[in-house]
Image: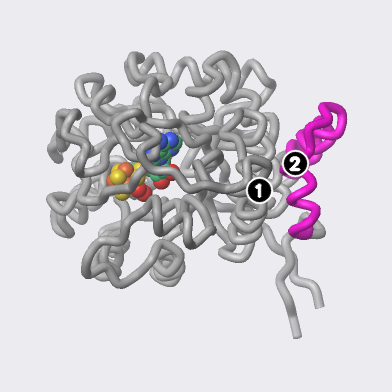
Amino acid sequence: MMMCKPISIQEPLTRDELLDWLREEDEARLSQLWARADAVRAENVGDQVHLRGLVEISNHCRRRCMYCGLRSENRRITRYRMTLGEVLACAHRAVALGYGTLVLQGGEDAELNVEFIADMVHQIKQETGLAVTLSLGERAPEELAAWKSAGADRYLLRFETSDKDLYRMIHPARPGQTLERIELLRSLQRLGYEAGSGIMVGIPGQTYESVADDILLFRELDLDMIGIGPYIPHPHTPLGSGEWRRDIDRADQVPGSERMVYKAIALARLMCPQANIPATTALATINRRNGRELGLMRGANVVMPNLTPPKYRALYEIYPDKACVNETAEECGGCLRRRIQSIGRSVGMGPGGRNRRRVEVS
Ligand code: SAH
Ligand code: SF4
């Protein structure tokens, strides 16, 4: 029987090896991990860093995620929803700035109904030809199918943590909801989307073991995109205010530290060599000076410059003090280009989708 194997034949790490790396604190040993992740990144996805223009189209949300500032019960934020015209203007700006992909992200907003988003995707594709990524929360399979038919290429839906008990506690289910995020990810794949997922690192109650399981799950799901960022407490949420907490042994608690995020990125790269992995804004938020660069040097290969109109930027407050909130789209793109060039990498052109390089072996 003919089998397909990735060109870079990488022995997957075991759960114990993942755990050892996650607990590793020795700088010299860690620099070996960074170097391995960087080499696997270079070999599998190359030196180009693709730019994905991010448009935060709505901060309305019907969910009550305990970690997020957009949760419906947070009455302290002013809510907004962008018009079709505003989003199309962002798409044209993405083209002008040389981006190949537009990411439409938002709260799980019921007013972003199936027709509105299908029409938006259709018009963006027709007018610009950009690759379109959606990240609009847990939506019905029929909606996801309609948006795929309208031309959407990719969908991002983080599973946040593979620890089912912790997940249930911090992510209350919606009445009438039938499918969980992992099942939705599988249906996205069946629909033909490139599927992305990911986690927050440092959620109160998150253990080292569960992060090792998260990384194994990235591989099992064969994800096309993997987003990893630190959990950043938001004071107007039950998790961020300390109102809610899960007591675990302190030695088991994963810190939401910069270094822990790099470890998770590097291990994700080793386990999923061909995935597109962003150096996230949350990472840049905890190290504004060079968090993005270090992410890109330790396994990441994508960045997401912000294209949201300035009047809405600060209102998309998933977590506080977000990096890159005060820059214009041009400044944000220019800053990221300079950072990419400063580490000897180049900016990717075109859509930069998952490259499934495979060789046939008997
Ligand atoms: N509503 C959509 C997309 C917007 S939220 C969804 O939930 O998928 C996008 C991501 O922001 C979430 O998946 C989560 O991982 C991250 N996020 C939310 N609150 C956060 C916090 N306090 N710190 C860091 N990341 C957070
Ligand atoms: Fe809504 Fe997403 Fe925030 Fe949850 S994480 S409250 S679904 S925006």
Q: Position of residue 1 (x, y in %)?
A: 75, 85
Give the residue drawn at x 32%, y 28%.
307
* Residue 22 location, quadrant: top right
Residue 33 sits inside the magenta stretch: yes
- Residue bounds of the magenta highlight: 13-40
Q: Position of residue 189 (x, y in %)?
A: 45, 66
Q: Residues within 10 Å of mark 1 (few under 14, many from 20)?
A: many
Does residue 359 appear left or right of residue 162 in this picture? right
Location of mark 2 (residue) = 23
- What residue type is disc 1 on? Tyr
Q: Position of residue 277 (x, y in %)?
A: 57, 42
Location of mark 1 (residue) = 208
Name the quarter showing ligand 2: top left
- Nearer to us in this view, 320 or 354: 320
Mark-to-mark CA distance, 1 and 2? 8 Å
**Majority SS type along the magenta span:** helix
Does residue 222 appear left or right of residue 155 in this picture? right
Mark 1 near mark 2, Cβ–Cβ under 8 Å?
yes
State the SS at label 1: helix
Give the residue drawn at x 45%, y 65%.
182
- What residue type is disc 2 on? Arg
Q: Is 247 drawn above or below residue 338 in the view shown?
A: below
